Amino acid sequence: MWSYYGSKSRIVHLYPAPKHDKIIEPFAGSARYALRYFEKDVLLIDKYKTVIDIWIWLQQCSEKDILTLPLLKKGEDLRTIDISEAERSFLGMMAGIASVAPRNKISAFSAEQNGRKNYLKRVANNLHKIKHWNFQCEDYLNIKNQKSTWFIDPPYQFGGHAYVHGNDKINFSELKSWCEDREGQVVVCENMSATWMKFNPLSKMRGANRLHTIEAIWTNEHTHYNNVQQQLF
């Protein structure tokens, strides 16, 4: 529903489909996996309160609420516009590309996209998908273990520091044990440079800095990715 650092929008179709009626994303962000399978019972959890506040606000919005938001103008400061804090956070995420937090100033790119008018239309058309979802602002360690499809997309071990909010750093040894202990289907996202789990290559990607990286996957169930030769990437 909005651009976010580390979003899986371009590769979400490559991940295994959910096998359970409930999807839990403990590092929700923009929740591209849940949006792909939106009809499921979805629980989004994120420690970053701004993310959860945006999701809750979107769930309460009508299409008109979205379509009447102010269009973005280059250099404009969102703090000078008379809108709610949730609206400001949402537009702040759209004010740049793959932001880690809401921006105050509108980038040239966002302004050139017709003020994001077409983007707002797309969001409005997708509001119906999230009306039955649930949201929690919580640390992943406090989530009740339950038989579900767990789509776990944490800040990456190398390079993910850009969107760790707050003073806490990820304890990857602790995260590994937590992932392995989940009940049901578990899908973990990472980069092939990560060492905290035995990951398999998923897809070659080109980042914003034009450097190629290899997205990786770990699952607790066998998939064809287990047979992919790493040298092919």
Image (cartoon, helix red, strand yellow):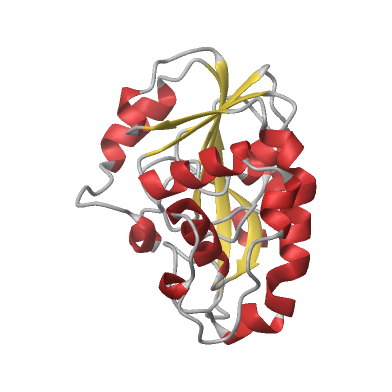
Q: Which residue corresponds to the image point at 69% horizontal and 71% vertical from the top-left?
A: 116
Where is residue 189 shown, x and y percent of the image? 52, 45
> Going 21% across and 47% down the picture, which residue do you hit?
168
Identify whether 169 is placed above or below 149: below
- Tell which of 38 and 191 is nearer to you: 38
Q: In front: 109, or 69?
A: 69
Q: Where 222 sits versus 122, above or below?
A: above
Q: Is residue 99 above or below residue 22?
A: below
> Is residue 49 shown left or right of residue 147?
left
Residue at x 30% of width, y 42% of height = 172
Q: Residue at x 28, y 37 (%)?
A: 173
In the figure, is residue 42 to the left or right of 52?
right
Res. 149 in view: yes
Residue 79, image x and y in percent?
Answer: 41, 71
Percent position of residue 120, x then y: 72, 60
Q: Position of residue 213 (x, y in %)?
A: 55, 66
Of the pair 10 and 98, the residue shown nearer to us? 98
In depth, the one of 86 and 200 nearer the eye is: 86
In the displayed image of the protein, which residue is found farthest to the left? 167
- Of the 4 image quadrants, the one containing the C terminus is bottom right
